[in-house]
Amino acid sequence: MRIVSLLPAATDIVAELGLVADLVGRTHECDWPAGTVDRIPAVTAASFSDATLTSREISDAVGGADHSGSSLYTLDTGALAALAPDVVLTQDLCEVCAVSYRSVRRAVRVLGGGPGPRVLSLEPRTLGDVLDCLVTVGELLGVRDRAVRRRAALRERLARVAALTEGLAAPRVAAVEWLDPLWPAGHWVPEQISTAGGRPLLAAPGAHTGPVTWEAVRAARPDVVLVLPCGFAPERTLAERELLTSLPGWEELPAVRAGRVWVLDGPAYFNRPGPRVVRGAEVLAHVLHGVRAGEPVTEREARRLPPR
């Protein structure tokens, strides 16, 4: 079966199911498993160079709070057609952060040459939804039993995190998914926090969030701040840390006073609705409680924000 993934999280799912050898196309942001997926042709590109833009400029470029402007992705329909996929995996959750389902359907309609590929749109909003996507994709790709087993194993890891942190004092946690404007992480991230023994602030499980004021963050008085901007590697986040540290009253936050502001690898474990969100919960067990769940947490996965 020839698979094209137009969503990094879907590529992660394909890898989790052991089907990377069937992947013939991917997005330019698909980066896992490292050293394997980068050999697969990319059929998307960035619509502009976000490396040269600030967080505010990127937000403005995609239409601000309502995401009514440009997507960050462009799709090479010619390259897609040349790959002759049997299955295309895409999404309909965010038209900015990945190629939208509507765009893919339009592209598939003009491919020609028979019925065309099957298009599957993934739209998980909760932690349970994310794991269920394994089975949805596995069923389409003919490996449903394998997918059910992998989902069960991931659920067991989440249960272990919850068991290890049960009964511990739950810190109040603010997760920041964008720096300017300030945007709290929603969807599955509040559940990741709760599973790891924290009390999520500013967003409810499964909720699609929007920008919040700095005053709202200050009023929430978080004990821990998680900084995990969507699409930013930790190094890029650290380069823009003054967007937070220069805010009025930053030093007065309980999290800052206690040295509990953490920079996390958002794209790997928090922004993408793929199986690695389970590792994200394990990382949070370490961050929130110093508890080891799974492999030791590396500095790339979680590091304290250094003083400005």
Image (spheres, rainbow, N blue to C red):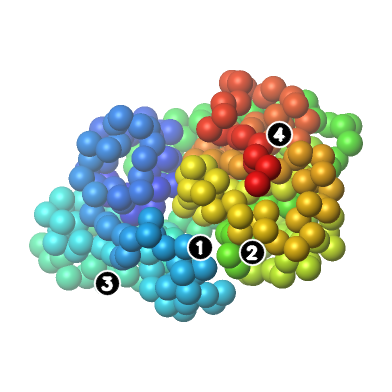
Please identify, in this view, whether the residue under mark 4 or under mark 3 is nearer the observer.
4
Q: Residue furthest front?
A: 308
Note whether residue 89 is visible: no
Q: Which residue is at a point 47% across and 35% down the rendered structure image?
A: 147
Q: Earlier in the sequence, mark 2 or mark 4?
A: 2
Give the x, y percent position of residue 217: 77, 61
Going from the N terminus, do you reach mark 3 or mark 1 first?
Answer: 1
Residue 175 image offset from top left, x and y in percent: 68, 52
**How many residues crowd around disc 2 within 10 Å: few (fewer than 14), some, or many (20 or more)?**
many
| Image spot of residue 272 (x, y percent) | 50, 49
The mark found on residue 120 in the picture is none
What amino acid is labelled 4 in the image? Val
Residue named by callout 3: 106
Mark 3 or mark 1: which is in front?
1
**Type of amino acid at the residue the image marks with label 3:** Arg
Residue 214 location, quadrant: bottom right
- Locate residue 196, reporting x and y percent: 73, 37
Q: Secondary structure at mark 2?
A: loop
Residue at numbered disc 1: 55
Quadrant in which residue 163 is drawn: top right
Q: How far apart are labels 4 and 3 at the CA level?
A: 44 Å
Give the quarter of the figure containing the N terminus: top left
Q: Which residue is mark 2?
A: 182
- Label 3: element kind: helix
Give the secondary structure at mark 1. helix
**Amino acid residing under circle 1:** Ser
